[in-house]
Image (cartoon, helix red, strand yellow):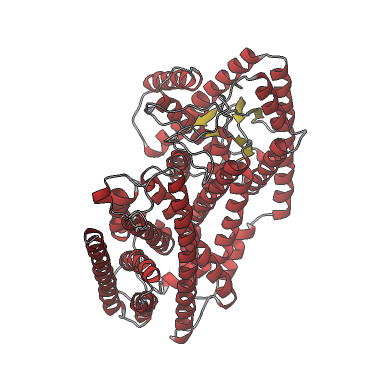
Amino acid sequence: MTVAAGVGYVLIALGPALSLLASVIAKKPFLILTLLSSTLFWLISLIILAGAWRAFLPVKSTELWPYSILILTSVGFQEGIRIGFWRLFKKMEDMLNAFADRVSKPRLFLTDKMLLALAGGLGHGLAHAVFFCLSLLTPAFGPATFYVDKCPSIPFFLISAIIALGFVIIHTFSMVIAFNGYTEGKRKDQIFVPFAHLIAALITLINLVPGGCNIGLPLLCIMAGTTLYYSWQLVWRRLTEHQTTRSSD
Amino acid sequence: MDDRSTDSDPVTAGESSILDTLGEDVIRIVSPVSLCMLLVVLLVSSVSSTNDLSSSISSLFLSSTTTPTSFSSLNLLLLGSDSTWEEIKSALVTALSFVVVVTLLTFLLVLLFYFRCTNFLRIYMGISSLFVLSFLGGFISLLLISHFKIPIDPFTFAILLFNLSVVGVFAVFMPKFPISMNQGYLVAIGVLTAYWFTMLPEWTTWALLIAMSLYDLAAVLLPIGPLRLLVELAMSRNEEIPALVYEARPVDPQPGDRVRVWRERTDVRIEATENSTNSATVQTVQETRLAVSEEITAPLIEAFPQTGDRHLGTEEEEDGIGLGSSGAIKLGLGDFIFYSVLVGRAAMYDYMTVYACYLAIMAGLGVTLLLLAVYRKALPALPVSIMLGVVFYLLTRVLLEVFVVQCSSNLLMF
């Protein structure tokens, strides 16, 4: 609508991400590098998905099932990639520990590992926000706005900004949960992440129904809040456990 | 006792972790490159000469939600409206002639360096930076002033321009200048030159980028390559080459830094903006016929520690991951310029390509730095990044855009 509105949409989508960046990630250069590489990773996975689906696009029908197949395959692929990402993360952790030994500095702390997971997740979330929301925001800086047929009550840019916000939170914190789950080997955490991602993506399917976005958006925000809460509980538990094991020695 | 555990507690240990300082060098190179790219993208999107941006977005937008014309519109955008084959031919000829001119001039530079005409080279480079800052800077400032309707009178403008250019020349070439001003002016020169390059027609820009990265690869790695000869000459004589090189030194030097002497390589390129032999590059913008001479330092430089001891200090790390915490990485200004040209040209299409190309260039830079740490010789910084950038640009434009627009216009995201 104007530059102000455009900037507003950007801040809605990226507000928490920017504050995380400024307060946590910008302080340690290695986390910035992790963020950049995980963003690249997510972009590559998105390009592979786009390549696989190119022949079937554009989907002309308004029925639900082609889109649900799209979502299922995309989410499945990305969750599969997450395991690969975790393996890379383990290798990097080993390299960092070897490096720390060589420079005679302490090995990676638990908080360091969680920070790395956070940076990785934030990279994924940023990539999502950038490619699904920001790159389409260019007309929003102009004089008009745009409404999608199926959702005539909210401008398109606002919907995509709020969805991007939800997904930024989900991606960021599910990486923390996933890495902790894979490290500890807890089934519950490992299953929670793909599950949450899938549910969130399926919630956006509700937007296909006319007027569905009025239900879909709040549900997505609830999902994001759930992921946030779960990761908070997990990190709290992990840190207090760690604290008690250390002090009991 | 608890040294066996892999997780130590920062609170009771009271030590800093390696995560605090690791990767500082890389960030000190990544930030100015990103800043340069950001400024070029901002300039391009605010004062663009070809207005592909908004029209392409709106056409893709509307067509993908309603009718299946997105394929045709995509094809139209990809191939362009007029005779594409002619454009491609002229682009190739321009790029080739440019590379030939650059090669000849680099050999000339090697010759001059061989005959120890260093002063001549320094003066020449000073004059060329003055030209870039004053003429190009003035031209682009005029564009900005007319676009944003800034009220300024010609006398103030002339005085400001004169002052800024002269200070810029001093900042770039005098050794005792504050490093932050040096870095700032180098980034400014990079932005101005890159913006000027984005005014070339599209096919020419891409052909030029690919040709320059191939030339870079050949000139640095082949035994007869001019840049390699230059580096070997400089190394054998233990001299510095006068060059426009960005040095990623920290702004305030920490005590106890071991300053490693880096060897750098440059090549001077006189760029005839006439391109009179190939009329295809004549722009609608009327530019003065100036010979802009600029340097591109093709390779990234690695360290040759003068003292010869490779022991690990408490702060430094020479091998392993290859990310030392002191000692500066030097990146030539030409690399800045060509990265920004690629991103600026991507900005002329759409912001999605900008992000994709930015990530690709950063990845290429990271790969080059890794190779630098492994091979420990001067390496060309252009090829990997530019090739990755071009590949990602094509992939985004052909594959990703349709997919993402299709998903998000239906409000489906994952």
Against B179, residue A161 (above or below) is: below
Q: Residue at x 53, y 71 (%)?
A: A49
Image height of B165 relative to B350, above or below:
above
Q: Which corner quadrant of the image does residue A103 belong to?
A: top left
> Residue A197 appears in which quarter of the rendering?
bottom left
> Looking at this rendering, what residue extends furthest in the right direction?
B224
| Picture coordinates of residue B366, whole percent (x, y) | 53, 47
The residue located at (35%, 27%) in the rendering is B152
The percent position of residue B402, horizontal first and vertical second, equals 52, 68
Residue B240 in the figure: left or right of residue B14: right
Closest to the observer, B261 or B185: B261
Give percent across and percent down for residue B23: 44, 44
* Image point (57%, 56%), residue name: B393
**Nearest to the observer: residue A201 or residue B27:** B27
Location of residue A200 by image quarter: bottom left
In the visual, does B174 lie left or right of A139?
right
Q: Position of residue B144 (x, y in %)?
A: 42, 36
Q: Is residue A122 visible?
A: yes
Q: Exactly how many numbered labels are in the figure?
A: 0
Identify whether B108 is placed above or below B86. Answer: above
Query: In this view, which residue lies farthest toward the front?
Result: B1
- Whether residue A142 is visible, yes or no, is no
Question: Which residue is found at the position 66% from the left and 23% from the top?
Answer: B234
Nearer to the camera, B366 or B127: B366
For the C terminus of chain A, the image quarter is bottom left
Image quadrant occupied by the N terminus of chain A: bottom left
